[in-house]
Amino acid sequence: MIRNLTNRIILIVVVLALALWVDFSSEIEILNPVTDEPLLSRNLEPRLGLDLQGGLQVLLEADIPADQQIDSESMEIARDIVQQRTDALGVNENIIQIAGDRRIVGEFPGLADTESVLATIQQTGLLEFVDTGDFSPEPGTILVTDYSPTGETITPSDPETVVYRTIMTGADLESVVVSQDTLATSYMINFTLKSDGAQIFADHTSANIGKSLTILLDKQVISSPIINDAIIGGQGTISGSFTLDEANAFAIQLRYGS
C-alpha cells in the first residue's frame, strides 16, 4: 500500500515538473539518449491573434454577377495569388483562406504597415508575355525580366542571372474567354489584344515561330506555349488539352493581370 502511494507521488511530481518545464519554456527538445539526435523539437512561443495583438483583416469578394458560379479550383488559385503577393512583402504569419464560395479572408496579426499590404492586394497582378526562345520553363518558375512597372532598370545581384525580354504586358489584353475545340475534346483560351498590343504580338510571333512565349504572373511562370503560327489581327488562342477547370483557372490568371 505504502509502495503504491510512493509510486503515485513520484509520478505526480514527475508530471508536475514536466508541466512546469513546458509552461516556462519557449522551445522544447527531447534528444535520443543513444544518438543525441532530436526525437522531438517544438517551438512553444505563443502566437497572438488579431483580437489580442491587433493587425489587419481583409475581406475580398469576387467581382462577378451574383448568379455566376465559381469553381473551387478558381478560388484556390485566387487565394494562392493573394498569398504569394503578401508573402513577397515579407509579412509573417499571415493567414489567407477561402470563406464561402466567393470570398477570401486575409488576416495579418500584428501588422503595422497596413497600407502597403492593402495596396499590394488591391492592385492588378503583373502579367507579362516574355521571350524565352528555346527555353520552356515549368509553371511556378520565377524569372527575371527587363520590365518594371516603375520603369527602373533591372540589375540582378547575381551577374549570371538571365534577364528575359518582356514583349508586352497584361495592359495590352482586351478580353479572355474559354471555349471548346472543334472536336469538343478539350478546352482552350481565346484572347483579344488592344491595337498596340496586336501589332507588337504580330511582329514578335511572325519572327519567332517554333519558339516559346512564356506567360508570367508576378514574375512566376503560369504557362510557356510554343508559337505555332504568326498571330495577326489581335486575336490568338492558347491550346494545350486543357480541361474545363484548367482552362477557367488559366483564364482567371490572365484576367487578374490585365
Image: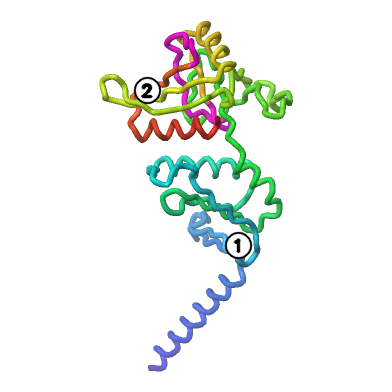
Asked whether the viewer can see residue 237, the reply is: yes
Q: In the image, what residue occupies the spot 67% across and 29% down? A: 149
Image vertical order of residue 246 relative to residue 102, above or below? above
Q: In the image, what residue occupies the spot 47% across and 25% down? A: 223
Q: Is 7 in the magenta? A: no
Question: In the figure, is residue 222 to the left or right of 186?
Answer: right
Tag 1: residue type? Answer: Leu
Q: Which residue is mark 2?
A: 240
The outermost residue toward the top is: 207
Quarter holding the C terminus is: top right
Q: Main secondary structure of the magenta part?
A: loop
Near-viewer residue (77 or 59): 59
> Which residues fall within the magenta stretch?
216-234
Is disc 2 placed on a helix, strand or loop?
Answer: strand
Looking at the image, is mark 1 or mark 2 earlier in the sequence?
A: 1
Query: How many marks overall?
Result: 2
Asked whether the viewer can see residue 45, the reply is: no
The outermost residue toward the right is: 152
Question: In the figure, is residue 219 to the left or right of 227?
Answer: right
Is disc 1 placed on a helix, strand or loop?
Answer: helix
Rendered location of residue 90, percent (x, y): 65, 45
Q: Is 222 in the magenta? A: yes
Rendered location of residue 107, percent (x, y): 57, 55
What mark, if any, has residue 50 been given in the picture?
1
